[in-house]
Amino acid sequence: MASLASDTCPISLMTQGAHAMSQEKELDPLGSARQMFGARLRRMRKAKGWSLDVLEAKVPLSKSQLARVERGSYLPPEKLPALLDDLFGTEDLFAELYVFACREAVRYGYGLLMDHERRAIGIKEYAGVLIPGLLQTEGYARALFRVTAARGEAWQEEQLAIRMARQTVLRGENPPHHAVLLDEAAIRRPIGGPAVMREQLEYLITMVETPWCVIQLLPFSYGEHGMLGGAVHLLTMPDNRTVAYEESTGNGTMMEAPDRVQRHVRHWDRLWAYAMRPQETATFLRQVIEELPSSTASPTGTAPVDPQTRTTPTPRTDVFNVRHATLGGMSES
């Protein structure tokens, strides 16, 4: 029996090695952007003479995750491409492949939105039900993916990676100016539970007024308006052309026809004029945090707004103009 074991074990190991090699050969780098990403990673790793164990020590992924990335069966976290480009000296090769891999993983309309966001010089949003994807925390986004589709954990993690990668457009050297019109409904529903929602609202407070982002809240007291029912994105492109993306549950439509786009622009500008100013928005967000169950947050800044005494705000004259230079991220001041 010992002789049999000694005879069969080497053959078994050789068979496993041959099987692994055949698996590598079967990977088609032209099959998809994800497979090309994996094939390039494997090629670069082997050119360095590194095993997966060596690579595991250099990046924040496990050996099994790296193996799945190389096979094209796993979309890695959005921080990995830049790390790989640094490790292998490939400039933006992995970063660019990752962009295409993310686009392939989403439905067509959403992929168009991601493509336009990357190229836009200005982004206006109306968020009527949910916090906009570009401003969602990881916990908030994870909670949404957990309930919006009957998919497994792998799908949820993939979508989360895509969502976080999408947000990198706001963290580049010259990000688009981001103006968010946030309906009160979007901050009242506690997605993911109180702790997750508290973290999300606290993050929004840090973003209400930055050099590249402005958030203004439209209170319930405003009543009905022309954008009820979903979310709208208005994207100003480098040629000063504006396109609109209208999103509802499970569907998204990109619009370029000037009459349809301008109808959304007019609605957005009107609502922006009636919305709370950024610091008023921050104060209101703090109040909502205080109202969450088991909240330990303490009031800061000015006194919270009492929803029972709040009245419909008066229109402002400083309407956010889509043609203003700061919208394009090219502030003249």
Image (cartoon, rainbow, N blue to C red):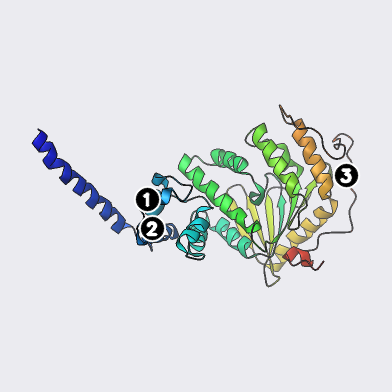
Residue count near mark 3 (Cα–Cα under 10 Å), binned few <14, some 14–19, many ≥20:
some
Above or below residue 56? Residue 296 is: above
Give the residue at x 51% y 50%. Answer: 77
The residue at which mark 2 appears reads as 45
The residue at which mark 3 appears reads as 312
Q: Which label's residue is closer to the chain start, 1 or 2?
A: 2
Left or right relative to 321: residue 130: left
Q: CA distance from mark 3 to mark 2?
A: 61 Å
Dot 1 and dot 3 residues touching (CB under 8 Å) = no
Helix, strand or loop status at disc 1: helix
Residue 15 percent across, percent down from the top left: 20, 48
**Foreground residue, 236 or 95?**
95
Q: CA distance from mark 1 to mark 3?
A: 61 Å
Q: Which label's residue is closer to the chain start, 1 or 3?
A: 1
The residue at which mark 1 appears reads as 52
**Foreground residue, 2 or 146?**
2
Residue 316 percent across, percent down from the top left: 89, 55
User: Which residue in the rendered view is the most extreme toward the top?
Assistant: 294
Quadrant assignment for the C terminus: bottom right
Left or right relative to 283: residue 207: left
Quadrant assignment for the N terminus: top left
Figure label count:
3
